[in-house]
Each structure stands twice: as C-alpha cells, then as structure tokens.
Amino acid sequence: MTVITGIKLNDKEENSLEFQKILSKYNCDIKLRIGINNTGFLCSSTGIILLQTDNNDTELSLEKELLNISGIEIQRMIF
C-alpha cells in the first residue's frame, strides 16, 4: 500500500518556519516531497505539499504534529 499525504499550508509567511521544523524532524522517513506553489503575478500565501513516508506510524505522528499548526489541511491518497 502506498499513501501520499497532501498538505495545504495556509498563511505560509506565518507558519512556514514551524512547518519546516516538523518536516526536518522526519526527514529520514520522507521518501518523496513535492511542493506546489500557486504563483501568478504575486506569490501566493498558500502552498500544497505532497509527501510519501516509509511507514504508517511515521505518517500518523507527522500528521498529528502538523495539525497543531493553525491553517493546515491534510488529505490522503491511498493506492
């Protein structure tokens, strides 16, 4: 089973440091990380990040920590 976690980070300027700190804590378990910026004429205040981790326990711990940041939305794709 492969699980891709989609994370929407709202208010990037305010939340990006804490977000990066949490991702760095789990960096050895993250197999895939893709960041999607919604740019145009101006830099967007939101971003979407796709993650794939090595195991479900890591994924659940990571998700729990990320949900403590205000403005985070998380969805999963399971294959």
Image: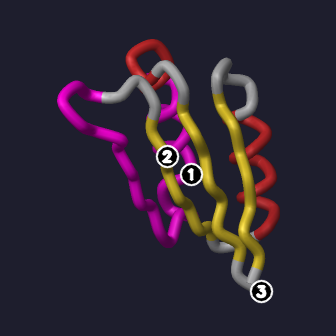
2, above or below 56, in the image: below
x, y percentage for residue 15? 50, 20
Q: Earlier in the sequence, mark 2 or mark 1?
A: 1
Among the 4 quarters of the image, the one containing residue 43 = top left
Query: Is 29 contained in the magenta span?
Result: yes
x, y percentage for residue 79? 74, 84
The residue at the point 77 percent across, 48 percent down is 61
The span from disc 2 to disc 1 (Cα, nearest Å) is 18 Å
Can you tell which mark lies on residue 48?
Answer: 2
Among the 4 quarters of the image, the one containing residue 70 = top right
What amino acid does circle 1 point to?
Tyr
x, y percentage for residue 72? 65, 31
Q: Earlier in the sequence, mark 3 or mark 2?
A: 3
Q: Nearer the viewer, mark 1 or mark 3?
A: 3
Neighbor class of circle 1 (other Cα within 10 Å; few <14, some 14-19, many 20+) is some
Q: Are marks 2 and 1 in contact (CB under 8 Å)?
A: no
What amino acid does circle 2 point to?
Ile
What amino acid does circle 3 point to?
Met
The residue at the point 77 percent across, 86 percent down is 1
Mark 3 = which residue?
1
Compared across the picture, whether 28 is left or right of 65 comes to left
Compared across the picture, whether 64 is left or right of 43 comes to right
The residue at the point 64 percent across, 23 percent down is 71
Q: Which residues are magenta?
A: 17-43
59, above or below 42, in the image: below
Q: SS of the residue at dot 1?
A: loop
Q: Are marks 1 and 3 in contact (CB under 8 Å)?
A: no
40, above or below 3, in the image: above
Mark 1 = which residue?
26
The span from disc 1 to disc 3 (Cα, nearest Å) is 20 Å
Q: SS of the residue at dot 3?
A: loop
Q: SS of the residue at dot 2?
A: strand
